Amino acid sequence: MPVFERGQSSGPETAATTRAAVIQLFATAVARTRCPFADEVNDPLAGLLTERAGAGAKDFGYKRETSGEFTQWGGLDAARLSRWVCAVAGKFTESLTGMPLAEAFGRSLEREAEYAAGDVRDVAVGVTRSWASLYRSGDRHEPHFHPNTALSAVYYVAAPSTCEIDLLDPRPNVDYFDPGISLAGESHRVRLACTPGELLVFPGWLKHAVPPFQDEMPRMSIAWNLNYTLG
């Protein structure tokens, strides 16, 4: 019988022993960090979002969402925060790929020939769409993802307590059977409890949801759809 190992083995082995490696596959990376200037921008942004969540906002019944682009109507604080979010997202991608954005972008399968020819331009993370959400008592947001988006970013501006978000297992088939013994973390979702000032960055294809919000004071967050832009 093989000996299954997740790391180096230091024990004695016999001639009949075979070794088998256990490899954990398909992990999903999520970045979580605190904004270093949150104390400077959160209160002004909370006041602005309160105004924007009034007349003219989109009321979906389960939450209110601002219209227009946050990066355009949010002023200097919005521009500062968005630049920081893009920088964090860029470093997140570089840490996962182990190479600069331009090299990682050029080495993708669709652009290998272009990369080999040396035609690799500057690549940065840019905002495709941005908006703010306001949750009142009883509001929630069902599981969803952001199409045509490389990375999704969520920043928490204000809340009376923690801001919960559910990240759903991206392997769809785990919903269709009970394995009896879980070998690959077959849980349907992971719930994170964030606080104002925290940022989450994750792949745009990752389904996420906001569980029912029960506090009387509103919860405010800002979201960005991020993609790679060529210089």
Image: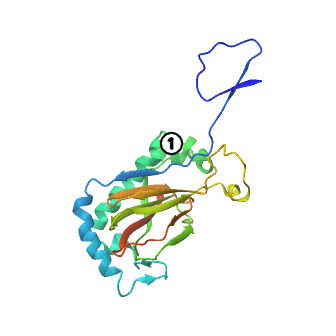
Estimate the x, y position of residue 53 in percent, counting from the top left: 36, 80
Estimate the x, y position of residue 201 in percent, counting from the top left: 45, 55
Amino acid carrying label 1: it is: Thr
Indicate the quadrant containing the C terminus: top left, top right, bottom left or bottom right. Answer: bottom left
Corner quadrant of residue 7: top right
Is residue 132 rendered to the left or right of residue 103? Answer: left
Corner quadrant of residue 12: top right
Which residue is at the front of the view, 129 or 181? 181
List the single residue furthest toward the front: 180
Label 1 belongs to which residue?
97
When the figure is inspected, residue 3 is found, relative to residue 146, above or below; the finding is above
List the single residue furthest toward the left: 40
Residue at horizontal 51 percent and vertical 42 percent from the top? 97
Residue at horizontal 61 percent and vertical 46 percent from the top? 26
Which residue is at the front of the view, 189 or 203? 189
Residue at horizontal 51 percent and vertical 45 percent from the top? 104
Indicate the quadrant containing the N terminus: top left, top right, bottom left or bottom right. Answer: top right
Which residue is at the front of the view, 93 or 189? 189
